[in-house]
Amino acid sequence: MTDDASPIFIGGPDRCGKTTLRACLVSHPRISIPAVGSNMWSYFYGQYGDLGREENLERCLAALLRYKHVRCLDPDPVRIRREFAGGPRTYGRLFALIHRHHAEREGKPRWGDQTGLIERYADVIFAEFPGARMVHLLRDPRDRYHASLELWPDGKGRAGGATARWLYSARLARRNLRRYPGQYFVIRFEDLVRRPEETLRAVCVFLDETYTPAMPAMTGAPEYREKRSHGR
């Protein structure tokens, strides 16, 4: 079994099944992943300079605490400051403290994060967390584009932008698989929804976790399961 030193990261472009996989994984008794993407790496990594300087840490922490996707994790700034002072002053460790405290409140030993295109940060994430695992979701680009139009009918970029994001993510998947064998896993959204048990068993082997039937049933994510039952 792994522990909280082996976080789980779910990546891939938008509308590729990250939230579906998250709903399955949090139905495992050991895994905690927030319901919304934290976007910490996308929005905050490296933006405030060296966190070894107190003023930079305070600026970064203040910005994190204002961001709604972080606030929903109910972070304790006093505890974060105290524990952060006792180790390396890196962005990854700061983000990990927020996630780890949230997982503790859920009574789960292993934390995770789902963030769109987090695969861009694979190098720094694996350097920060040598035991980490990253699961990358890909979906048929035509189906993904149709799903994005349903959610954002007035979105900019349309087919060109959607194609560029998909190609960018797919190239990163190929590159990261070569660079991090054993730590990187790519699955197709279509396999997850058509063969959920088989796919989730493979994911559990990759994560070194025991498969449980609660995962495809999404018992740990009742709100998401309710949305799916109504075809949303």
Image: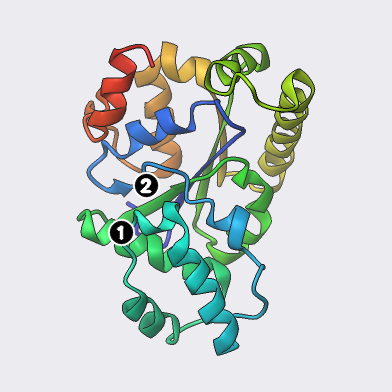
Residue 125 sits above or below residue 161 on the image: below
Secondary structure at numbered mark 1: helix
**Above or below for 8 versus 54:** above
Instruction: Check if mark 1's residue and mark 2's residue have beta carbons within 8 Å.
Output: yes
- Asked if residue 20 can be seen in this view, the reply is yes
Left or right for 187, reference 21: right
Residue type for callout 1: His
Q: How many marks?
A: 2
Q: Nearer the viewer, residue 155 or 25?
A: 155
Q: Is residue 49 above or below residue 106?
A: below
Within 10 Å of disc 1 (Cα), the crowding (few <14, some 14-19, many 20+) is many
User: Quarter-wise, where is residue 123 in the image?
Assistant: bottom right
Q: Nearer the viewer, residue 221 or 1?
A: 221
Q: Earlier in the sequence, mark 1 or mark 2?
A: 2
According to the picture, the residue beneath numbered tag 2 turns out to be 34
Instruction: Decide which of 203, 120 is in the foreground and name it.
Output: 120
Would you say residue 126 is visible in this rendering? no
Q: Which residue is mark 1?
A: 102
